[in-house]
Amino acid sequence: MLLAASALHADYSTQSGHGYSASLGELRERFASFGQEHVFRFWDVLGSAGRARLAAQAAALDLGALAAADRATRELAAPGARCLEPAPIQRLPEHGGDAKLAAAARECGEEMLAAGRVAALVVAGGQGTRLGFEGPKGAFPLGPLTDRTLFEQQAQKIQGLRHRYGRPMPWYIMTSAATDTQTRALFHSHAFFGLPEGDVYFFQQGMIPAFDFEGRLILDQPDHIFESPNGHGGSLTGLVASGALDDMERRGVSSIYYYQVDNPLGRIGDPVYLGFHAAAGADMSCKVIAKLDPLEKMGVVARIDGRIGVVEYTELDDEHRYARGSDGELVYWAGNIAIHVIEAAFARRAAANADRILPYHASAKKIPTIDDNGHPVAPSEPNGRKLERFVFDALTGARWVTVLETRRDEEYSPIKNASGADSPQTARRDLMAVYRRWLSDAGVEGLDVTAPIEVNHAVFDGPDDLRARRIRRVAEAGDAIRIAPGVAE
Ligand code: UTP
């Protein structure tokens, strides 16, 4: 393991070699030898509880590995140093994809779901700083007409899959120190949204300290070193460290359906995607949409030095960002929407080789700190570098990868900002547009296209469900389809 901090917090007290047993003198000496002695600068004024807190946190840090991780972020191949080529992608039928292949893939994916071989994994450990919502993002009320939270909407989708395929679908929820308590409390206070409690498994990702621009750890309290969640790539190490992967294997799960908490349009357990992934014998797969323009902030899928992977938008150079083919289309058009299928066996291999496959990336951020008097400071400009692992880096460690194109209007409208683009307003608008399309595709009548609408995914998760239940008019769907009162039936 790279760092003590890359394991669960609870593991801190169990680290041999860096444990509480190290005397304070040795601990301070070790920090001094790494140029980090400033961490103890308030020691003399700390009470006994503060000293214990700081000493325990400091003792758990493997400074050598941490410094190496930070150094490695600077050694990540400079954008121009990597050879990029377009990746092969299963296109949508309207873009030349083979509809017959997609139909065969659906059958294969449905068999996997009916055999109980698929688990859902949501990464919900992020701090949602841009959204600025009090609480975990998954607790954000996004129902267009109700206070249905993102987590409840996902629970409905999973409930729908359970009914459709007659098998439990275990749901793994990755939290972090920043989101864990509130996430669990939400599930308990809502009786797990109707799912069996035993099929919902919470685990925490690791935390990792940040560095200022001189490579020094940052105190955010006189007795505490600032740490933040170690990135969505921490899901792979976290699955192993927490025992969640063992739990999956005990349940006969072979494929993990990975998604982010903040995209209410994302499908869970899409059988076509699962089928393409399985038919190709892929270790890990990736769903993409066409980027709107070269500057859209999305990582693109490409062959990187011969292996399929994702280049983060911050790491794509202009030559490739703006490259267009003879047809005028972007060469690197395939934006990653962070919905992956990952083989459980591959997750284990990737976690075991995390230092190589999942290197840390650094980004400049405003990191809460304290001044020389120990008073809190909220910087107005970036003052340090946060380190994160990116789950899509694992693609380059996979023996085989499938990349599948999907439609933006059907599958992607994330909630990143409090207002404007990628906000709750745009996500609600796009979700309602999806619902209206389902109804119209299924020939359901009596819909005022301007009326706000909300659909219960546990009952209807697409036009096929409406057809199967022979819903002809909105009113026949009961509570499962709500329309704003007085606007339409
Ligand atoms: P983002 O990178 O968009 O971060 O995460 P965020 O926390 O939601 O928002 P900002 O950047 O602070 O505004 C994409 C997905 O990855 C998860 C998030 O919860 C979200 O589902 N994530 C991110 C984690 O689970 N852990 C992390 O350490 C980082």
Image (spheres, rainbow, N blue to C red):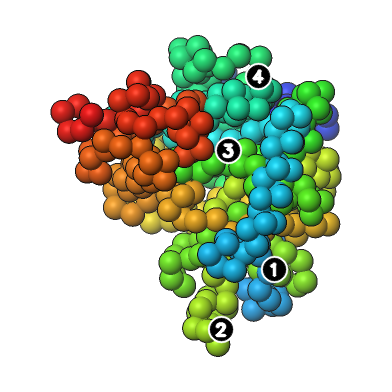
Q: Earlier in the sequence, mark 4 or mark 1?
A: 1
Q: Say the numbered circle drawn on residue 325.
A: 2
**Label 1 near label 3: C-beta < 8 Å?**
no
C-alpha separation, residue under disc 4 versus residue under disc 2: 48 Å
Q: Residue at x 66, y 50 (%)?
A: 103
C-alpha separation, residue under disc 4 versus residue under disc 1: 36 Å
Q: Earlier in the sequence, mark 3 or mark 2?
A: 3
Q: Please, what is the three-letter code of the amino acid marked with disc 4?
A: Asp
**Label 1 near label 4: C-beta < 8 Å?**
no
C-alpha separation, residue under disc 2 versus residue under disc 1: 15 Å
Q: Residue at x 61, y 42 (%)?
A: 270
369 displayed left or right of 61: left
Q: Say the numbered circle drawn on residue 268.
A: 3
Q: Between residue 271 and residue 147, name the one nearer to us.
A: 271
Q: Please, what is the three-letter code of the amino acid marked with disc 1?
A: Pro
Q: Please, what is the three-letter code of the amino acid marked with disc 2?
A: Gly
**Label 4 near label 3: C-beta < 8 Å?**
no
Q: Residues within 10 Å of mark 2 (few under 14, many from 20)?
A: few
Q: Between residue 97 and residue 406, name the one nearer to us.
A: 97
**Label 1 near label 2: C-beta < 8 Å?**
no
Q: Residue furthest left?
A: 486
489 displayed left or right of 16: left
C-alpha separation, residue under disc 3 versus residue under disc 4: 16 Å
- Look at mark 4 in the image and give the residue it sits on: 199
Nearer to us: label 3 or label 4: 3
Q: Earlier in the sequence, mark 3 or mark 4?
A: 4
- Look at mark 1 in the image and give the residue it sits on: 88
Q: Please, what is the three-letter code of the amino acid marked with disc 3?
A: Ile
